[in-house]
Amino acid sequence: MRITNVRLPGEMVEKLDRIASSMLMSRSEVIRHAISMYMILIEHLGEYVRPSTLLFRDLRVRKDRNSVIFDMGNNMAITIHSFSYGGIGEKDLDSVKAGYDLVGEVISRQAIVEALSRNITPVSAIINFTCDLAAGKKMLRPMYRNFEKVGVAGNRVYVTSSEELSGTVQSGVSLSLVGAGEPDFLENRAKSGDAVLYVGDPVHGIELVQSLEKVISIETIQKLAEYRREGIVNEIVPVKSDGLNGALSYLASSSGNQLVIEGSIAGMEKGGPATSLLISCKEKYEDRIKREFNGVIIARLI
């Protein structure tokens, strides 16, 4: 790598150091990632927004689960959904033994599910490996295939770093999916009176190695996202590592409603990447969601 000197205000350097410390990264790594993301935005977002017209004094930034949302104030938002997996792969000390093609399949599918659930249009993917690039390349093949399905061509998928200086005995990968969308669709649109349905299977960890077919398909989330834009579905909430209870709590609190549980949720408590979703919809669409996505009603919003 070439060395480039940059002068920065003291306050910015202090903020860089705080971010680096919280992310267990060096200051240089944070700067490289920030510049990589900015260059991708400039290079690829011309079809959505002209960077020269952005008024950054009006920029509003907030965090929502795995994403950071940059509301540009011009009915356009830029989002970055970030994910990382460690200790899953083919190396000696990986706690979960899995083929690298499976790791790439699941992490890319999870990123796509979470972006499309907010009606985000994926624009580019930034990938970093904390293991050697040879291992990373095996993860890349399914990533390229999945991103192609949602309009992200291979030349918009960037590998910005890998670990080549020291031998690694564990696998690691991080993925940031950059997207663009309308701020209105980034808000929780669930309404009082909505039925809440559970779609998918509650598998995680080692179970994923044996049950890849249970992961929500890209085609399924594309259809649900279309329904959300049309108003057939009001909200889509992926179930994450905090499980079903965490997803239910998020759905209720972020929409300003309360939940009434219907029936038993036993066996659904566990969460995993892109394996299950909560869907909220009007009562008149319940049967449609049940029929098309094998949805199970578990609650109602009041």
Image: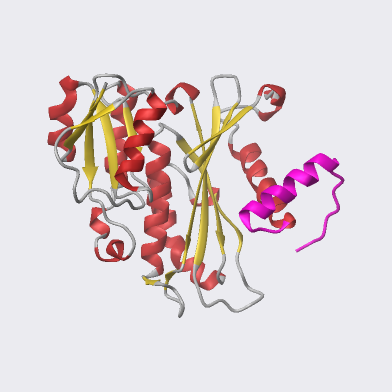
Q: Position of residue 155 (x, y in %)?
A: 54, 50
In the displayed structure, would residue 256 be above or below residue 80? above
**Left/right of residue 70 with respect to residue 187 in the rendered view:** right
Residue drawn at (71%, 48%) of the image: 18
Q: Position of residue 106 (x, y in %)?
A: 37, 56
Q: Position of residue 54 (x, y in %)?
A: 68, 25
What is the number of callouts on the image?
A: 0
Stretch of the chain drawn in magenta: 1-26
Image quarter of residue 295:
top left
Image quarter of residue 206:
bottom left
Quarter the N terminus occupies = bottom right
**Left/right of residue 152 with respect to residue 262 in the rendered view:** right
Q: Is residue 259 visible?
A: yes
Seen from the viewer's position, the closer of residues 284 and 48 is: 284
Seen from the viewer's position, the closer of residues 230 and 141 is: 230
Quarter the C terminus occupies = top left
Q: Is residue 238 visible?
A: no
Residue drawn at (37%, 47%) of the image: 240
Here the colouring is secondary structure
Q: Position of residue 118 (x, y in %)?
A: 41, 32
